[in-house]
Amino acid sequence: MIFLQIARYASITLTGIALLGAAPCNATDHPRLPWLEVRGNTLVANGEPLVLHGFNLGNWLLLEDFLFGLYGVDAQIREAFADQLGARASTFWRTYETVYFQKEDAEYLQRKGVNFLRVPLNQRRFEDPNCPGVYDPEALEQLDRVINLCAKHGIYVLLDLHAVQGGQSRQIYANSASSLPEFWRYADHRRRATDLWVFLAARYANESAVAGYDLLNEPWTEGQTELLTQWYRDTLSRVRRIDQRHLVWLEGDNYGKRFDGLTPDLLDQDGVLVQFHIYPDLVVPVGKLAGYPGEVDGVFYDRAFLEKHLEAHIEYSRKKPLLLGEIGLYTAEKALTVAQKVGEDLFAIAKANGWSWAIWTYKDHRYMGLVHPRSDTPWRRFLASTAAGKTRTLSAGFIEDHDLTPSTTLNEAADKIGEGLRWQEAYHTMLGARRPFLMLQSKALLAPLGTATDESVRALAESFAFANCEESPPIAGLYLSGRGR
């Protein structure tokens, strides 16, 4: 396989010069979308105001266990596939990445009026941890393909660095098998992430269908916010030597909920904007409310409560455009009706303030996607098989159930460990302690595929093709709410 490489740490004048190996995206076969620009607190295209609205392409180049149906972080799931399927694992992933988003998906989103797709990127999918600065051409070709498809159908693409080498938080989606956010422990991890952005900026500098760059998804530095601020400064400086035109979105420390670490020298730069994420169940105790609006423990939850919670975001959006980069529903949530009503109020606030937005997510196994494989597809039938069910039962109580409910034992242990400490840190430490076992769990689930043929392995991946999927009514309803319908 031929790889693309850039010179790292070299002091080179890059303005107007393509980086070595960073060939521009071959995007000449689609109509040019107007460049996005900022005028006051409004995004404009061809001089006309534009609100971006659409979805994230979660679970494509970066797997999340409950969105996919197995256990562990992306790297562990891929290792489990390689362990059980050998060379056929490549057949699965090549097929999966290709069918996950095709012309039929773009056409479907266009019919729904979608004009925006936030695409989560996994640094390890582009760059082997042991090969700094060497980027996989197949991953780049897949990304080019999706950008081209979206551009042909009037959809802007936001490049979102969703997982970096070492992991920017303890969360599963940060792709740290140890659960430790080692991105903040080693300067080399941070330099390599900056290098990747320099490479991508050179590759897509002239691609107007790229809405911009989301430098880092939901960072959690665990008290080292100044490292995030400085990394943003360094990365912005190097990207701007190559690309002065694309918009850049920043997310604050503590999972991008607010503005932690986003200092005035960053926020005041032209073309630099803020993105934040909010989910109904993370701001309102949806599981405790008998209805919404409603009261729990003396607190009344309604739109006024949400507006108060978001007052800093409302104030910011009076000056610059704001992006609500993630909002979504867990369709397995027992209090789904309450969560839906909270989501409707969140979207009402977004519309009142002119925020752009993206729902998490467009497609997945069956929990948060607008579309998901039907129950009769090979992947869904495999996960629902007797063998898979037996494997899950044997480890019940040790792993998280796929209804997103942590085991009681885990919660109790985190409570004890977390006395006098941050409960969140204790909880995620407990989760991290289980991650090596989660990969073993995925290997056990995949064991029946040890004798599968290439054809059957390909059929498993093709379960995610649009023709084999169906729409999720709750997520479709959330989208319509966002559109004000």
Image: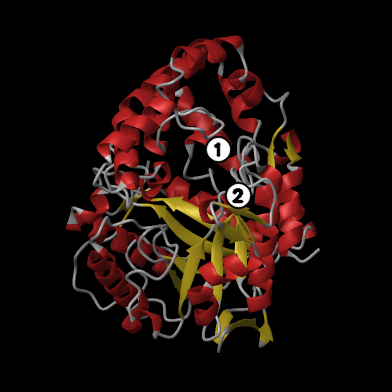
9 in relation to 271, above or below: above
Residue 408 visible in the shown view: yes
Q: Earlier in the sequence, mark 1 or mark 2?
A: 1
Which amino acid is tagged 2?
A: Thr
The picture places residue 228, in percent across and down from the top left corner, at 28, 65
Task: Mark 1: give few (<14), some (14-19) or many (20+) Cα within 10 Å.
Answer: many
Q: Quadrant of the C terminus?
A: bottom right
297 in relation to 231, above or below: above
Residue lying at 59% horizontally and 79% vertically, measured from the top left: 35
**Looking at the rendering, which quadrant does residue 192 occupy?**
bottom left
Residue lying at 64% horizontally and 77% vertically, measured from the top left: 354
474 in relation to 306, above or below: above
The picture places residue 437, in percent across and down from the top left corner, at 34, 23
Asked if residue 187 lies left or right of residue 128, the reply is: left
Q: Quadrant of the N terminus?
A: top left
Badge number at residue 407: none
Badge number at residue 67: 1
Query: 57 or 301: nearer the eye?
Result: 301
Asked if residue 193 lies left or right of residue 157, the reply is: left
Query: 385 or 407: nearer the eye?
Result: 407
Q: Pointers 1 and 2 in contact (CB under 8 A)? A: yes
Query: 379 or 340: nearer the eye?
Result: 340
How many angstroms separate mark 1 from mark 2 (CA)? Answer: 9 Å
Task: Mark 2: give few (<14), some (14-19) or many (20+) Cα within 10 Å.
Answer: many
The picture places residue 388, in percent across and down from the top left corner, at 54, 15
What element does badge 2 sit on?
loop
The picture places residue 461, in percent across and down from the top left corner, at 59, 30
Badge number at residue 361: 2
